[in-house]
Amino acid sequence: MAGPRAPAPRTAGGGLAATPPRLSVSAVVVTYREVALTLEAVASLKAQSVPLEQIVVVDNDPEHSVREPMQAAHPDVRLLNEDNIGYAPACNRGAAASSGEWLFFLNPDAAAAPDCLERLLAVAHEHPQAGIVTPQILFPDGETINAGENQIHLTGIAWCGRYEEPVEDAPPRPVLITTGAAMLVRSSLYRQLDGYCDEFFLFYEDPDLCWRAWLVGSEVWYVPRAKVLHHYSWGQSGRKFFFLERHRALSVLTNFRGSTLVVLAPLLLATEAALLVVATREGWRAEKVRAYASVWAMRGWIRARRRKLATMRRRPDAELIGRFRTTVDSPQIVSPVARRAAPLLRAYGIAAVALVRALGR
């Protein structure tokens, strides 16, 4: 594969830059039985205006279904075979085998526009504190937003920002969390954070990584003019809700300071009560309860992770708390219970944000 060369000089907004960035990038694609789409994802990486130092594909299918097609279509790609170890652990495995200064994670069902990486690197060059830079994720029609500037509530509930809205044309901006469907991460930051959380088999690894990046002093930037098409479907299953609820709880319990958790306790408890009602009505209560049991079993892990993160913190919760949402406003989350409880939860959320800021911790 061709070595890296400097991209055409341009600023994050699309104009000319004073000096172009000269950064090497390794791409990591984790796939599980999505052979045709994975081949398209890799082809989009090879079509980038900034050549990649290497492409690493982690085949998480125990039957290794992508191995022969990948070797035939892209023999220069480094292929790692795993036995369904989970998305986050597989990303970490791919990152460990990568040598670039930056890691570009791309979902196997996504395809990056040819200038996507160039635009992301321009922002990384202009904003040295940017440790994570991501594009706008569009549905295959190229006109409708799937994700990008994602949102996260004070309780850790996260959702796709501007979901199903028209494509956005705007300059880059810092955001609290974004999507892992296509994510450029500084390799040194990824190592500092121990990458994605290995305990997150599926789901929520991206908001957790972004949250921790901010805590250790880095920044997350969103670049709407860098684009990726994504064959996305929400889908619902009890197993999905188990992972989402388990990992949300683990992130909240490890990333917030103890004093912040005390302030948020009434809001967190009220939200859990509402979620139990929703889970019962929608048929995934058993998975919700199983998530509680798993979090309790991991209480030792939670304590150890809190201690480690405390030594790495460079930003207090007071500095970030205002970036969290005090309401859950997503077309993906439709619940009469949540709608009725929203005014009270919003009022408490606003008060909690003010109190955390006043505490300054």
Image (cartoon, grey):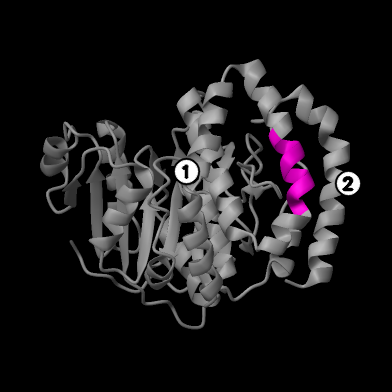
Question: Which numbered circle lies on residue 50?
Answer: none
**207 to 174, vertically: above or below:** above
- Secondary structure of the residue carrying tag 2 is helix
- Across and down, in percent, residue 356 comes to 79, 64
**199 sits to left or right of 151:** left
The answer to which of 291 and 146 lies nearer the viewer is: 291
Residue beneath label 1, please?
A: 297
**Looking at the image, do the residues carrying marks 2 and 1 touch, with CB atoms under 8 Å apart?**
no
- Across and down, in percent, residue 344 comes to 88, 39
The answer to whether any part of residue 14 appears in the image is: no
Q: Residues within 10 Å of mark 1 (few under 14, many from 20)?
A: few
- Across and down, in percent, residue 64 comes to 17, 35
**191 sits to left or right of 262:** left
Q: Is residue 267 magenta?
A: yes
Residue beneath label 2, please?
A: 347
Q: Is residue 235 magenta?
A: no
**Count of number-bearing discs:** 2
The answer to which of 252 and 320 lies nearer the viewer is: 252
Q: Residue furthest bottom?
A: 18
Question: Where are the magenta residues, as a range?
Answer: 264-272
Q: Which quadrant would residue 273 be assigned to in this image?
A: top right
From the image, state whether disc 2 or disc 1 is nearer to you.
1
What residue is shown at x 41% (from left), y 65% (from top)?
Answer: 190
- Marks 2 and 1, Cα distance to the nearest angstrom? 33 Å
Q: Which quadrant would residue 266 be assigned to in this image?
A: top right
- Secondary structure of the residue carrying tag 1 is helix
- Across and down, in percent, residue 7 comes to 38, 70
Q: Amino acid at mark 1?
A: Ala
Identify the image quadrant of the N terminus. bottom left
